[in-house]
Image (spheres, grey):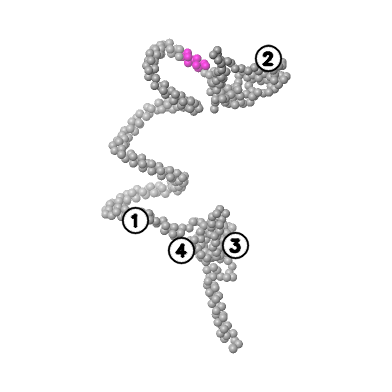
Amino acid sequence: MNGRPASNPVLIGAATVLVVIVGVFLAYNANQGLPFVPSYRLEAELPSAANLVRGNEVRIGGTRVGSVESIAAERRRDGSSVALLGLKLEPGVDPLPRDSTVIVRPRSALGLKYVELTRGRAREGFEAGERIPLAQATPAPVEFDDFTNMFDDDTRSAAQANLRGFGDALAGRGASLNQAIGALRPLLRDLVPVAVNLAAPETDLARFVRELADAARAVAPAAESQAQLFVGLDRTFGALRTVARPYLQEAISEGPATLDAGIRELPAQRPFLRNTEGLFRELRPGVRALRAGAPDLAGALEAGTPALRSYPPFNRRLASLLDELRTFSEDPLVPRGIARLTETVRTLDPTLQFLAPAQTRCNYLALWFRNIASLLSEGDVNGTWQRFIIVATPQGPNSEGGPSAGIANGPTLENRLHTNPYPNAGAPGRPAECEAGNEPYLRGRAVTANVPGTQAGRTEGTP
């Protein structure tokens, strides 16, 4: 055996096999990076890793910068699942800015995919081993089968119908199309100044379009309601189709004459409309007050409906009375009496303004009549009985049990005079309270005027 290694066939064969094995190993792992070469590893969350396999390329700007090292599914806390990719990148990518995005894109129509990274502009970058969050997996990828699924049976049938309809519409109409093209020339000529005006900076067309977009976004939630509106309009116009001629046609033809008549006559109606507006303004307080009494008024109207049937005979009997009233109204002394009555009412107006809140606010008059009726509600054949209770007066100086030289003011807690001859009832210039019946008993103090503090502004039977 020769002692030179180069002439040893066993050693040469072993070296050749080793070189082949190393070459095959390097070729097999070439897509995943060469061994003993430093790399920059990151993880990325994706909504789906469909058709991705280990070894698929990772690109930035169309240049290969790494490969997909691992693919796994990860379950999140909310129960959803995401695809977790292990990316093995070249050291030159380090650091990848934190606002970078990731997306899976198709490389061929046969389903081959690759991962595309879009570098952001953030100053900070991902450290090796960090994870790109799911929020940065944008934009949402569009799969080829999603695109082809748009053309379902209905869409294909509609496309065929459109092509057939356009073909039938254009067939044999070459001369008409030529005339239409010729008529477009004046339109385009007149369109030039309009386009110049729209393109001028003073027009601010861009802002107009943005505002239109904002308006569209604002009405988007009501899109279904608007669609139903058009459905209802179609139903309405379908119903009007039966009376379109001659009725609607005549109404439309009479429209100009009606508008001319309105232009002539409506100015004369302005005083009437102005007075009507003033009348309704003055009626607002009364109408507002009717809200509380509306149920009672409804009951009164239901009860009064049968009584209205007897009104015609009653009105015939009133004819003679109305004749006398007409004679009375024509008497020259009547206006003088009405003037005196008006003066009397005007004189009583401040008093009525002062006393009215006692009933309108505090309901004292109705409560007084109710209590009087309750006081005298029991009795026998000889009459009613007044209900009362004997309360012994406290003893002490100036007691209310007999004549006194002053108000009862002690020394005991019980011998204290409590009287309020002019309780507040919400009159003009007075506190808005219903003091009578609501004032507290101030134990140990003599009270001969209004109780300190503001009492309740309502009584039984008032809102």
Q: Residue type at mark 3: give it.
A: Ala
Q: Secondary structure at mark 4?
A: loop
Disc 2 marks which residue? 401
Marker disc for residue 111 = 4
Please report contact status of discs 2 and 4: CB closer than 8 Å, yes or no. no
Q: Nearer the viewer, residue 202 or 238?
A: 238
In the displayed structure, would residue 209 be above or below residue 137?
above
Please report the bounds of the magenta region as a residue range: 339-348
Please name which of the two marks, 3 or 1, marks the residue nearer to the observer.
1
Whichever of callouts 4 and 1 sits on the residue coming sooner in the sequence is: 4
From mark 2 to mark 3, how far is it between C-alphas? 102 Å
Q: Secondary structure at mark 2?
A: loop
Q: Residue type at mark 1: give it.
A: Gln
Tell me where residue 88 sits by quadrant: bottom right
Q: Residue type at mark 2: give it.
A: Gly
Residue 378 drawn at (x, y percent): 56, 17
Residue 103 drawn at (x, y percent): 50, 59
Whichever of callouts 1 and 2 sits on the residue coming sooner in the sequence is: 1
Please report contact status of discs 4 and 1: CB closer than 8 Å, yes or no. no
> What residue is shown at x 57% (from left), y 25% (from top)?
459
Disc 1 marks which residue? 160
Please name which of the two marks, 1 or 2, marks the residue nearer to the observer.
2
In the displayed structure, would residue 405 be above or below residue 74?
above
